[in-house]
Amino acid sequence: MFSESFQATWSPRVLSILRIVVGLLFLEHGLSKYFGFPQASPAAFQVIGMYGLAGAIEMVSGALVTIGLFTRAAAFIASGEMAFAYFISHFPRNFFPILNAGDAAILYCFIFLFLALEGGGPWSVDAARKRA
């Protein structure tokens, strides 16, 4: 469908766009837990305990993934958090992700795992640090 030169040019850029969008969405989850922004999550303001740790991971790794700094490590930690969240919170409710509301956790887990392997792409602080 696309030529090889088109793919070679745009695949790394789209990787960076994916990283930025997913990082911002993940950051939003942490902000909603800690600051109730843009809307308080059901676990809002529980800064101690499992939800507090999840919110901290989401804010820090979401911010790092968004700017592309330490992308591989931050994405790996976020992937692990999402796997843990799925099996602790969603899976016990029902086997099927659409019924246990765990589809987002699964998607985040595998997208972050992909970013942990691929890195942040050309539009990242990591890439800028390599060029310098």
Image (tube, rainbow, N blue to C red):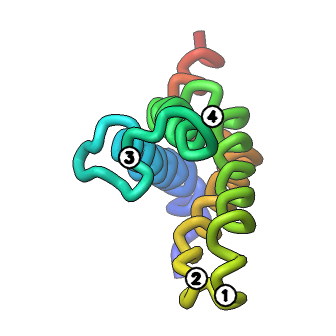
Tag 4 residue: 71
Circle 1: residue type: Asn
Q: Return the residue at label 3.
A: 44
Identified at 59% across, 60% down, the residue is 108
Residue matched to label 1: 94
Q: Is residue 65 above or below residue 83?
A: above
Q: Residue at x 53, y 82 (%)?
A: 1
63 up-or-down from 17: above or below = above
Q: Is residue 57 left or right of residue 24?
A: right
User: Looking at the image, which is closer to me, 126 or 41?
Assistant: 41
Residue at image location 24% in from the left, 52% down from the top: 39
User: Quick check: marks 3 and 2 in contact, CB under 8 Å?
Assistant: no
Res. 13 in view: no
Of tags 4 and 2, which is closer to the observer? 2
Looking at the picture, does residue 101 appear above or below residue 124? below
Q: Label 4, secondary structure: give it.
A: helix
Amino acid type, callout 3: Ala
Tag 2–tag 1 contact (CB < 8 Å): yes
**N-term mark: 4 or 2:** 4
- Nearest to N terminus: mark 3 or mark 1: 3
Residue to which mark 2 is pinned = 100
Measured from the top left, where is residue 72 in percent x and y? 70, 36
**Sequence-wise, which precedes: disc 2 or disc 1?**
1
Foreground of the two, 124 or 131: 124
Q: Please tell me which residue lies in front, 90 or 24.
A: 90
Per the model, the C-alpha gap separating discs 4 and 1 is 32 Å
